Image (spheres, rainbow, N blue to C red):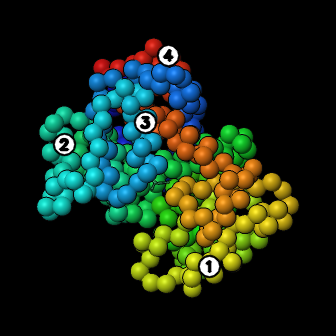
Amino acid sequence: MNRSASPLGKDLVGLEELSAEQIRTILDTAEPFKEISERRIKKVPVLRGNTIVNLFMEPSTRTRISFEFAEKRLSADTVNISSSGSSVTKGETLVDTARNLEAMRIDMVVIRHGSSGAARFLADRIPSNVVNAGDGSHEHPTQALLDLLTLRDHLGSLEGRRVCIVGDILHSRVARSNIWGLLKLGAEVGVCGPRTLLPPGIEALGVETFGRIEAALEWADAVNVLRLQLERMKSGFVPSLREYNRVFGVTRKRLEAAPRDVLILHPGPMNRGVEIDSDVADGPSSVILEQVTNGVAVRMAVLYLLAGGRPEKAEAAKRGGLARE
Ligand code: CP
């Protein structure tokens, strides 16, 4: 495969930078890759010979493991690095860490970092492909892509569909990536939460704002429920978690009062009883675990395309394999 011919360019930093066509290409490429995870032997030689470093400087369960499964199922060689076990704790910079990894001849870096802009900063400084696995409150593109794939599975085309993101929009990279992706695919986007957790001027992006969860559920075909990111809050943005649940919690009673079936998404990790009640999270409208399953296929598609795989050859690639040239 020819990496320089990737339809995505060198890196995947955010959905703000992608066109609607590039987003559709990723989602369409993920479709044939879904089936690999259903096989008894979940492995194809598509990325044989590629070395991928997962550089996770912030905690993660779903994203880190999902990328690792995607890499292993495509037969790439993988190395996992976290801040606690690395020389970052001795003061080494991000770029020095990456350059040392490159000296050992790697091909891609998947990075999660607490600072907004860290993925772009790295992508501009190393020749390896860089994939953003979440940077501060900036973007989490593969999360939004798996959300879009899950919405598309259930709603078909997203053109004119109404999706409301509920909760802590202010601190959420998932919200930002979802807003870019949904708008580019023609959906109507709403955000709902306490005014203190909605970024000032967010309406300028072309989203509808809701101050009441009941109104959001009445409007939406799907809601993507976010947790309160208490670790990023420097002061009290909500009076208490109990109060938040009472006013903004997605509860069965509120869902049943909606005029149509509303699809429930959540990127995880969930705080049950705060932003979402258990009988909603585990109920018939929930597609939360489907999101997790789709995450592996979406990440396979992103890695394949960045490595120079052609979208139209994804079906053939998963049967026969295309190693890097
Ligand atoms: N959705 C998500 O990013 O989860 P993790 O923090 O567990 O990776």
Mark 2 or mark 3: which comes first in sequence? 3
Please state which amino acid type lies under the numbered disc 2.
Answer: Leu
On residue 289, which mark appears? none
The mark closer to the camera, 2 or 3, is: 3
Q: CA distance from mark 2 to mark 3?
A: 21 Å
Please state which amino acid type lies under the numbered disc 3.
Answer: Phe
Task: Provide the residue designation for mark 1.
Answer: 242
Q: CA distance from mark 4 to mark 1?
A: 51 Å
Task: Provide the residue designation for mark 2.
Answer: 101
Q: Residues within 10 Å of mark 3 (few under 14, many from 20)?
A: many
Mark 4 or mark 1: which comes first in sequence? 1
The residue depicted at 77 percent of the width and 71 percent of the height is 214
The residue depicted at 39 percent of the width and 20 percent of the height is 45
Judge by depth and name the residue closer to the eye, 181 or 272: 272
Q: Residues within 10 Å of mark 4 (few under 14, many from 20)?
A: few
Q: CA distance from mark 3 to mark 1?
A: 37 Å
Q: CA distance from mark 2 to mark 4?
A: 31 Å
Residue 80, horizontal then vertical, whole percent: 29, 44
Please state which amino acid type lies under the numbered disc 4.
Answer: Arg
| Residue 86 in sight in this render | yes
Residue 309, horizontal then vertical, whole percent: 42, 26
Is 23 left or right of 115, judged from the image as shown? Answer: right
Mark 3 or mark 1: which comes first in sequence? 3
Task: Provide the residue designation for mark 3.
Answer: 69
Please state which amino acid type lies under the numbered disc 1.
Answer: Arg
Task: Provide the residue designation for mark 4.
Answer: 319
- Report which quarter residue 198 is drawn in: bottom right
Contact, mark 2 vs mark 3 (Cβ under 8 Å): no
The residue depicted at 57 percent of the width and 85 percent of the height is 239
Contact, mark 2 vs mark 4 (Cβ under 8 Å): no
Q: CA distance from mark 2 to mark 1?
A: 46 Å
